[in-house]
Amino acid sequence: MFGSMRSGANAYAKVGIETGVVAASPHKLIVMLFDGALAALATALQHMNTGNIPGKGQALSKAITIIDSGLRASLDHKVGGEIAANLDALYEYMSTRLMTANLNNQPELIEEVQRLLQDLRSAWEAIAPAGQAAPEAPPAINDPLAPNISGLVKA
C-alpha cells in the first residue's frame, strides 16, 4: 500500500549519503571512498563464508569500482608525481587481487586488500587538514542501509 519498509529506509539512507557527499571536503570524500571499499570487502567476505556466490561477486565488484573509479580516478598525476604513480600501481594491484579472490574463492586475498586499504586510510587521516580529522572507520558489518558511494569520482 505505502511501499516496503526497505525501500523507504533505502531512500532515507541515499538522501543521507548524498547530503554527506555534498557537504564533505575533498579530503573527507576520500575517507568515504576508503570506508565504502572496506565495507564492501567485509560484505564480500561474509558472502564468501556463507557460499553466496552472487552476493560475493556483487560486493567485490562494488569494491573494485570504488578503488578504480573513485580512489584511482581521484589521483592527480601532475601534482602527485611519484606518490600518485605508486598509489596508482597499488590500486591496480588491489583490483587484480580482488578479481583473483573472486575467481578462486580466496578470502586471504580480500583480507590482504583490506589491510592495505586500512593502512592507506590511516595515513590519509594523519594528513587531514586542521579541524577536519576523519572519524574512525565504521565496524565492518553487512548493513543493508550502508551508504552506496560506488558512483563517486573526483572531488
Image (cartoon, rainbow, N blue to C red):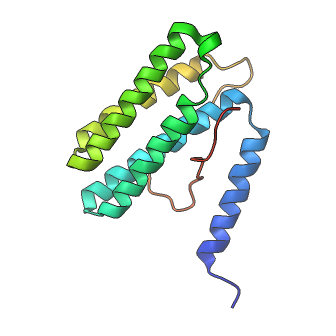
Residue 115 visible in the current orientation: no
| Residue pictured at 40% horizontal, 45% vertical | 41
User: In this view, which residue lies farthest toward the top?
Assistant: 82
| Residue pictured at 25% horizontal, 56% vertical | 49
In percent of width and height, residue 20 lies at 73, 45
Q: Is residue 22 left or right of residue 32?
A: right
Dividing the picture into quarters, in which one does residue 33 lie?
top right
Asked if 48 appears above or below 12 in the picture, the reply is above
Asked if 21 appears above or below 14 in the picture, the reply is above
User: In this view, which residue lies farthest toward the front?
Assistant: 78
User: In this view, which residue lies farthest toward the right?
Assistant: 23
| Residue pictured at 58% horizontal, 18% vertical | 126
Dividing the picture into quarters, in which one does residue 70 lie?
top right
Q: How many marks?
A: 0
Most foreground residue, 136 or 6:
6
| Residue pictured at 31% horizontal, 32% vertical | 112
Most foreground residue, 120 or 138:
120
Q: Is residue 105 left or right of residue 90?
A: left
In percent of width and height, residue 146 lies at 56, 55
In percent of width and height, residue 107 lies at 25, 44
In percent of width and height, residue 152 lies at 63, 42
Residue 129 visible in the current orientation: yes
Asked if 150 appears above or below 6 in the picture, the reply is above
Most foreground residue, 8 or 152:
152
